[in-house]
Image (tube, helix red, strand yellow):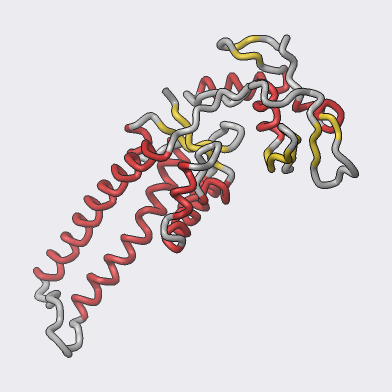
Amino acid sequence: MNWYYAHNGSQQGPVSEQELSRLMMSGTISASTLVWSEGLADWQALSVALPSAVVSVDAPQIGGVAVSAANKDLYVQQMREGVVPTIGGTMNFAGFWIRVVAKIIDALVAMVVMILVIGTAAGILYALGVNITPPEANAAPEAGFIALIALYYLVALGFPILYDWYFISKHGATWGKMALGLKVVNEDGSKVSNAKAVGRAFAYMINGFTCMIGVIMVGFDEQKRGLHDHICTTRVIKTN
């Protein structure tokens, strides 16, 4: 459920219940801050509208962070998984440039795979005597050349999706992100599911139709989210 809150005389949001807790622990809002969500007749104090989001300053300390009883298990689980805990505003979001470098590393991996696959296919076709040379002007392309072009697009479109799905669902990060100590998590810091990993890979492709504006958003978003992160409610964080 999305929530809105009043801050410095203006409406902020939407944010999740977990984000309200983090905002409270960071001192941005308090238990008396007015909040609203769909279904409420009017704005109410956070302590009245959503008591579960109110974290006491006297809550037990874990790793120097006050954690409510309701969030203790999640916090400990995140620490065990090597994820920067997200309770109390401690999520360390990865910025624009470090994510660009990670994406460059992933692009190099994709390039190597492309060269190996196309090169191997071309070698096999050549050994079988199939013509794979580009057609001359006004000439129809040979079947071998068409097959290589089709294979190129299949790998170019399919590999990034399979690559992101496997590594993010299994390890929480691609090779590029792992090399830089980054991880993709849900908004509450938990592990991304198989379905969401696939959806995020497809969502990233939308950036290609927006002149990469969806990627540039990372540099201006408060939580460093790209368009694909907004669509799939994911965050990219630093783990060290």
Vertical position of residue 140 compared to residue 176: above or below: below
Q: Image quarter for residue 46?
A: top right
- The image quarter containing residue 159 is bottom left
What quarter of the picture does the N terminus occupy?
top right
Residue 157 relative to residue 47: left or right:
left
Q: As displayed, is residue 109 above or below residue 48? A: below
Residue 80 x %, y %: 51, 20
In depth, the one of 38 and 12 nearer the eye is 12
Residue found at x 46% / y 54%:
213
- Horizontally, residue 111 falls left or right of residue 10, namely left
Q: In the figure, residue 44 lies in which quadrant?
A: top right
Toward the front, the furthest residue is: 9
Q: Measured from the top left, where is residue 35 in percent x and y?
A: 79, 35
Residue lying farthest to the bottom in this orientation: 138
Instruction: Give the side of residue 19 with respect to residue 190, left or right.
Output: right
Where is residue 201 drawn, in percent x and y? 46, 52
Residue at (22% x, 50% y) in the render: 112
Looking at the image, residue 67 lies above or below residue 52: above
- Nearer to me, 133 or 13: 13
- Image position, residue 15 (x, y; %): 68, 39
What residue sits 48% from the left and 56% below the top?
Answer: 202
**Closer to us: 121 or 164:** 164
Residue appearing at x 63%, y 10% in the figure? 61
